[in-house]
Image: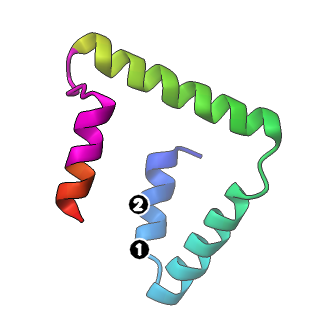
Amino acid sequence: MNPDALEQEALHLPVQERARLAQRLLESLDELSDSEVEQLWLTEAERRAREIDEGSVELVSGDELDRRIRDRL
């Protein structure tokens, strides 16, 4: 089934059924094998590397990141 169509169908479910489905989907993430988790992290790393190469994200130093975090707290 097409994921977009499935998403649209799920969004039309009653709220309790959507909540049950959301809970089950989240729980299913805890059941991933090591190789599935590794693949997800690899995909994420590739996405982030592509954003850096495209210049669509702002890179900051570790010190700058620490400062920004402290400022928010």
Residue 11 appears left or right of 17: left
Residue density around tag 2, few if under 14, some if 14–19, many if 20 or more, within 10 Å: few
Residue 29: name its quadrant. Answer: bottom right
67 above or below 28?
A: above
Residue at image position (27%, 40%) is 65
Residue 63 part of the magenta segment: yes
Specify whether 28 is left or right of 57.
Answer: right
Residue that numbered label 1 is attached to = 12
Quarter of image, res 48: top left
Q: Which residue is drawn at 77% across and 48% down?
A: 32
Kind of residue indicated by mark 2? Gln
Q: Name the residue under label 2.
A: 8
Contact? badges 2 and 1 (CB < 8 Å): yes
Secondary structure under tag 2 reads helix
Q: In which quarter of the image is the C terminus?
A: bottom left
Task: Give the residues in magenta.
Answer: 55-67
Closer to the camera in the image, 63 or 11: 63
Q: Which residue is drawn at 69% across and 66% down?
A: 27
Q: How crowded is mark 1: few (under 14 residues within 10 Å), some or many (20 or more)?
A: few
